[in-house]
Image: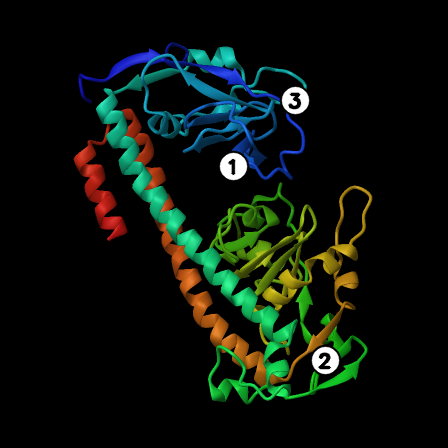
Amino acid sequence: MSSDWRDTTWGDLGTLEYGKAIRDYQNATGAVPVYGTNGPIGWHDKPLCPSAGVVIGRKGAYRGIHYSSTPFFVIDTAFYLKPKETLDTKWAYYCLLTYDINGMDSGSAIPSTSRDEFYKLPVRIPRLAEQQQIAKTLSLFDDRITLMRETNATLEAIAQALFKSWFVDFDPVRAKQEGRAPEGMGEATATVFPDDFEESALGLVPRGRRVSTVGSVVATVGGGTPDTKDASYWEPAEHCWTTPKDLSGIGAPVLLDTERKLSAKGVAKISSGLLPTGTLLMSSRAPIGYLAIAQTPMAINQGYIAMLPGSALPPFYMLFWCRQNMETIKSHANGSTFMEISKKAFRPLPILVPPTSVVAEFVRIGEALFARLVENERQSQTLAALRDTLLPRLISGQLRLPEAEAAVEEAIA
């Protein structure tokens, strides 16, 4: 470890400044991001911190560490770090990620970060130039991950727009009815669309489409949770088992892996068993509406409605149908403790069923986009895992910068 590094405490490096309560930040249109205990939550017109900086969660069962690259506002559930000396705040952010902030509880009724405990935390700090270089090296990972996820958001938006054009606005049918060639498609694709409309229970729809219910055209199943006190259901941990928590932080509607695993005995305890790759998962409670397509076989808990491959309407189509109709889905939920949509309430929802040829053409085009999205998400997770491996070693000085930079170059090549 370099002799240029010095030992100190966070209390010597800076203070935790309280955020301030403001109203209507969720609907505001200002340019200043507003942070709470778990990250960005809205906008404001004036910053509380006039520079880039670090936000530390103050209240709540989970309190995160966040970085804002621009001046920002912090509400009263969080602190922001105010340096006492010249400090690279991006380095400070990465350094603080290596601490257990949630373990520093002040002992109040609501879990809260203790400023006194924070100030006592030891820290080993390099010279400013090395702080900046460490932050720059780690930022390469985050920048590449951000770029991939922005690309994925664009790919998903293209597919959703295509779904809306074909299956909600009926643009190709309207074009043909008016004697125009449908935009953005070849002649072969255009042939799968009719050129007129007919009356249905759902109003005027393209000829050849029929009104049905979700349960008639999609196979849906639920899941369960084996006894968590019986280790034989969980060890050896061989098979993926998901709860909606796995979907809460994903950057794209794909699920590559799960936090917990089941043994073969545990899978056998769930009536729906191990669901195949390509199954669409929709969280049915707390909250309703997380969506992802499983990229590996997995079992599910009782917080999901799963839509299986092989149905008349495939999971890829239903992913965008659910997105388009989520408010309708939520309107059929009920519950006293928390809102939930049951399979019994979900299956009777009306759905307009297009001809197989139209659905197949949408899947053909859309799945090409989705394949790129899945690969980007795999790469993002690989980069995140490598970043998390290098982070504590770089921050502690155990890993020299040239070694870290070589690992970064290899990973992002």
Any part of residue 397 in sight? no
Q: Residue sitting at 67 percent across and 61 percent down?
A: 271
Badge 2 element: strand
To which residue does mark 1 refer? Answer: 31
Nearer mark to the viewer, of 1 and 2: 1
* Picture coordinates of residue 169, whole percent (x, y): 65, 72
Whichever of labels 1 and 2 marks the residue nearer the N terminus, that label is 1
* Picture coordinates of residue 389, whole percent (x, y): 33, 38
Q: Quadrant of residue 2?
A: top left
Q: Is residue 95 above or below residue 86?
A: below
Identity, as a three-letter code, of the amino acid under mark 1: Ala
Q: Residue sitting at 59 percent across and 63 percent down?
A: 280
Side (left or right) of 57 relative to 385? right
Whichever of labels 3 and 1 marks the residue nearer the N terminus, that label is 1
Task: State the separation of the CA atoms marked 3 and 2.
Answer: 54 Å
> Label 2 crowding class (10 Å Cα cut-off): few <14, some 14-19, many 20+?
many
Q: Is residue 232 above or below residue 100?
A: below
Q: Residue sitting at 36 percent across and 38 percent down?
A: 388
Q: Quadrant of residue 106?
A: top right
Any part of residue 384 in sight? yes
* Picture coordinates of residue 164, whole percent (x, y): 61, 69
Q: Which mark is residue 205?
A: 2
Task: State the separation of the CA atoms marked 1 and 2.
Answer: 43 Å
Instruction: Please name the colour scheme applied to the rendered image.
Output: rainbow
